[in-house]
Every structure is written in structure tokens, then in C-alpha cells.
Amino acid sequence: MRAYVFTDRALEQQAGRFVWLQIDTEKAGNAPLREKFPVVALPTYFIVNPADESVALRWVGGATVSRLQGMLDDGRRAVLAGAAGGATASRAERAFARAERLYGAGDNAGAAAAYGEALAQAPGGWPRYARAVESLLFALQSTGDDERAARLAAQAFPRLRRTPSAANVAASGLGSALELPAEHGARDSLIAVLEADTREVVYDRGTPLAADDRSAAYIALLEARAAAHDSLGALRVASEWAAFLEGEAARAKTPEARAVFDSHRLSAYLELDQPGRALPMLTASERDLPGDYNPPARLAIAYLAMHRWDEALAASDRALAKAYGPRRLRILDTRADIQVGRSDVPAARRTLKDAIRIAEALPAGQRSESSIAGLKKKLDALP
């Protein structure tokens, strides 16, 4: 978003309408704010009503310039409608406004019910249909209602085909279908429909999508091929995914814009069992972005996959010197894997104990019980 969206001159018209604030969620001093405005995925955007600091709108995920413009307009409209009472709004708009408030407060179950009501009451051509569907999908997934999410995506995709929402709806729906138990009667049919929708999104380059949305669709296709035990199909998707990302990175105009694709490119190369392909790009990113812990952290993962233990540890050292907050935990987790790989189990045990200590000391807004449990399980599994 920083590299491709916030720099667009079209957003200048919004400059005076909002007070803009970017929060570094890794810093301990921002933990109380993160506790007040829960962030379950990055990026997350909030439009906050200045009168009472309530959330008028929450959006999880990236956005194109046009979608961001619409989101900002909707957020401003929600604040103004709240000030005016919104008595003249339609039933769909009132349900949608209620859903937005619940969604912004992190009440995903309540938001799902209200979004569903809004969609049921909405007239044809309702301008908030796409955002209501995408927010409802995220709310349903957050509450574990994968069947309803998959069915919603399959139903909504034909209406959202060739729009900026197409990739998120198809890929999210496919992910939910894959989460259904194997014995679920509709699982196979939902996967078939949503995998076809996701393939359409990936291969139709005329659809106006952000590159990271198309990349996420590739990831969903990979998961579907893995679930089908189709190793050749998975390799084919991974190869196409890597080629797509390399093309996008080659067109980047700045080092930051190029590095946007590093994470997914590394994942694609790992899927192809070719981690060495990531070394040139990550070395360039570490050189061009000296304050960023991500390039050396990713180099550590690539060297780990190549069994180049000493270089992996050195990259891990460089990443730890720059990282802070919860992100240190992921680097330490990788470091323990490196130490196990080089047969230094005592060092791996010390690293995981350090990670657990750090995780347990994090303030409430940053502490993750699931992360702590995962680290303890990994420690217990060491020989």
C-alpha cells in the first residue's frame, strides 16, 4: 500500500478530510492502542469517529486506489450519518451501518448477522454490495463458519466477476471450502466451483486487481492442489506464480516497490524446492533497505532450506539486530530450526526458551496465547 497506493496523486483530494495515522504495531508503546483497536491481520484500516473514538469503518487487507477512495467516502458517510442519526436511511443501509459498527468493534458474529441482513434487504445495484460481501466473508471465517463463507463466495462471485473484489471473494471462499471436513457433503462441489472461479481470476489479466490480490489467489490454488494430492498440479501453479511475481518485481520503480514481492517470491521458490533463486533478490533488498529486518530474516529461511547453516545463522543475527516486538518471535523460531538442522539441539532449546520468555513478557495488546502455546509445543518436541 505504501509503495503502490498511498503515493497516487488521486488521493490528494482526501488529504484534508482525515487525520492520517500509521501505527507500528510491533512497538510496545502502541500496545494499548492495538488493544483498543484489535488487529487480527495486516494491513488493517480503521476510520475513527472523532466525536467518541468509535470505529466507523474497518477494512482488513489491501486495496486499489479506487477501492480505497470508496472506503474513505463510506467511512466519512458513516461518521456523518451517525451524527445525523441516519433515520431516513433504508433498511439495508441501517443494517449495513450496524454491521460496520459491530465489525469495527471486533464483534464478528454480530457483524456477520447484520451484514447478512443488509444483503438480504439490499436492492439490485446496491453500491455497497461488494464491501458487504468481503467484510461478511472475513467475519464468517473469523467465527469458523466456513460452510456459510464458501457458499456466500460461490453465490457472490458471478456478480463480482471482473471487479477488484473478484480475487478476494474467490480465494477466500476456496480457502473456507478447503477447511470443511472431508465428510462434508458439499465440500467437493464447493471446492470445484471456487477453484474454477479462482483460476479465472488468476488467468484473466483484464480484471483490475492489485498484484498482491492476484498473488493470494495463486496461494489458494496451491492449497487446493495440495489438498487434492496433485503434486504436479501444485508445481505447475507454483511455477506460474513465481513467473507472475518476477514480472511484477521487474516493473517496480523503486527498491521498496520491488521488495513488496519478496515474501511471496520466496514462498513460491520454496514450493518449487528452489530456495537459491531467492538469494539475489533478498541480498539486493538487504542492501537497498538497510533498516528493514525482513530481508535478512527471509535470507535465513532460504539458507535454512539450502542447509547452509552458518549463513542462515548469520542472517538470523542480522535480522534480530533490527527487529523488535512480536516479530522477533518468528525470527527466533526460524533460528531454532537452523540450530536443529546443524545438530545443536541445546542451542535450539535455549532459543525457544528465550522466545517463550519474550512472548510471555509482551504487553496485552501484543501477547498471543496461541503463539506461546506453539513455541512451548515445539520446545517439548525437541529430543
Image (cartoon, grey):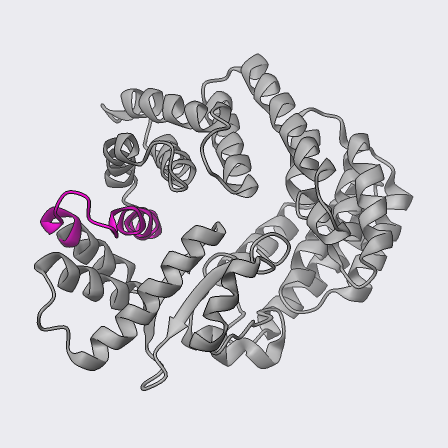
Q: Can residue 331 be seen in this view?
A: yes
User: How many numbered marks, from 0 up?
Assistant: 0
Residue 54 x/y as whole percent: 32, 78
The magenta stretch spans which residues?
118-143
Q: Let me know if residue 344 appears in the view.
A: no
Q: In which quarter of the image is the N terminus?
A: bottom right
Q: Where is residue 176 in the image (x, y as percent from the top left)?
A: 35, 37
- Image quadrant containing the C terminus: top right
Residue 281 in the image: state x and y as whole percent: 80, 40
Q: Residue at x 29, y 25 (%)?
A: 190
Q: Which residue is drawn at 80% across and 44% down?
A: 282
Residue 155 part of the magenta segment: no
Please, is residue 48 above or below residue 132 in the view?
below
The answer to whether residue 203 is left or right of residue 298 is left
Q: Quarter-wise, where is residue 52 in the image?
A: bottom left
As drawn, is 218 to the left or to the right of 268?
left
Q: Is residue 156 left or right of residue 348?
A: left
At x 56%, y 72%, the residue is 23
Q: Is 107 placed above or below 266 here?
A: below
Q: Is residue 15 above or below residue 227?
A: below
Closer to the camera in the image, 274 or 334:
274
Which residue is depicted at the point 52% across and 43% down? 210
Characterize the magenta stretch by its predominant secondary structure: helix
Residue 357 drawn at (x, y percent): 65, 69
161 vs 240, nearest the viewer: 161
